[in-house]
Amino acid sequence: MESLTRRQREFLAAFLRLYRRLRRPLHYGAVARAMRIGRATAYEMLAALEGLGLVARHYQSPEGPGRPRVLFRPTAQARRILAGVWEAPVWRAAQARVRSELQALQARLEPTAVLQWLTARVEEGSIPEGMARMAAGIGLVLRFLQATEGPWPLPRGKALDLGALASLSAALTALARAEPHQVHALLSRIRWFQAQWERLDPTDRRRLSRFTRQILQETGRAG
């Protein structure tokens, strides 16, 4: 399958959220109203995604005279591609789990302990939980760097590009004087995070960005 454009991915993510919320196939007019776009634009996007095997259409016969209504639903392939589109309860649970782990670490919240925390759980939990854990780790590394290098203000009112900032997490290996196996494990985790970040829709990127800022605030240094 050819790759999606950014616009197609964002539209598909929004359509999948809408479908999950309403739990029924949708007419393109309803999609247009929900997304606040033109009906023709909604139909063209759905038709393009249908051509990629990500959306399927079927026709609903009218109760009386008239033409059948065209309804659309996401395919299983679309749900696999956008497995990173997180439902609100899943995201809340992921945040709660990570906050609980951080609370247990609070008494020894220093680079060595944080490095052990991040690398010991490479295979654990769901994707949202793993992403939340790495987002929190990025926040903590920023905190450590601020403590050693001085104030490092983050842009206010904007989502953080955690895909780029994830590379800073590698500084944790120097701060913690990591063993080679820990370096390998952390770099592997950073690559995993960056690959998942590229697949996320904008809503989930903003969620992770807000979470990182919250971790900075909750651990004593606001961004």
Image (tube, helix red, strand yellow):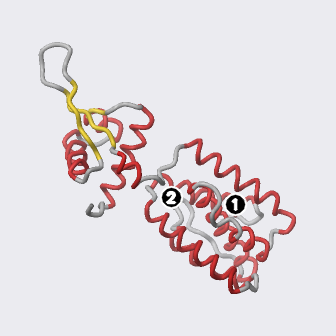
The residue at the far right in this view is: 107
Residue shown at 59% from the left, 48% from the top: 91
Q: Which residue is mark 1?
A: 215
Q: Residue 62, how many percent across, how many down? A: 19, 19
Instruction: State which tag comes first along the sequence, 2 or 1.
Output: 2
Q: Which mark is residue 61?
A: none
Q: Residue 100, how many percent across, how many down? A: 76, 53
* Residue 77 sits above or below residue 135 on the image: above
User: As drawn, is 62 to the left or to the right of 154?
Assistant: left
Q: Amino acid at mark 1?
A: Ile
Splitting the image into 4 quarters, where does residue 70 fall? top left
* Residue 166 sits above or below residue 72 on the image: below
The residue at the far top in this view is: 64
User: As drawn, is 79 to the left or to the right of 210?
Assistant: left
Residue shown at 64% from the left, 67% from the top: 122
* Residue 219 sits above or below residue 80 on the image: below
Q: Which mark is residue 205?
A: 2
Q: Amino acid at mark 2?
A: Arg
Badge 1 crowding class, 10 Å Cα cut-off, few under 14, some 14 to 19, many 20 or more, is many
Residue shown at 16% from the left, 13% from the top: 64
User: As drawn, is 19 to the left or to the right of 185?
Assistant: left
Q: Are marks 2 and 1 in contact (CB under 8 Å)?
A: no
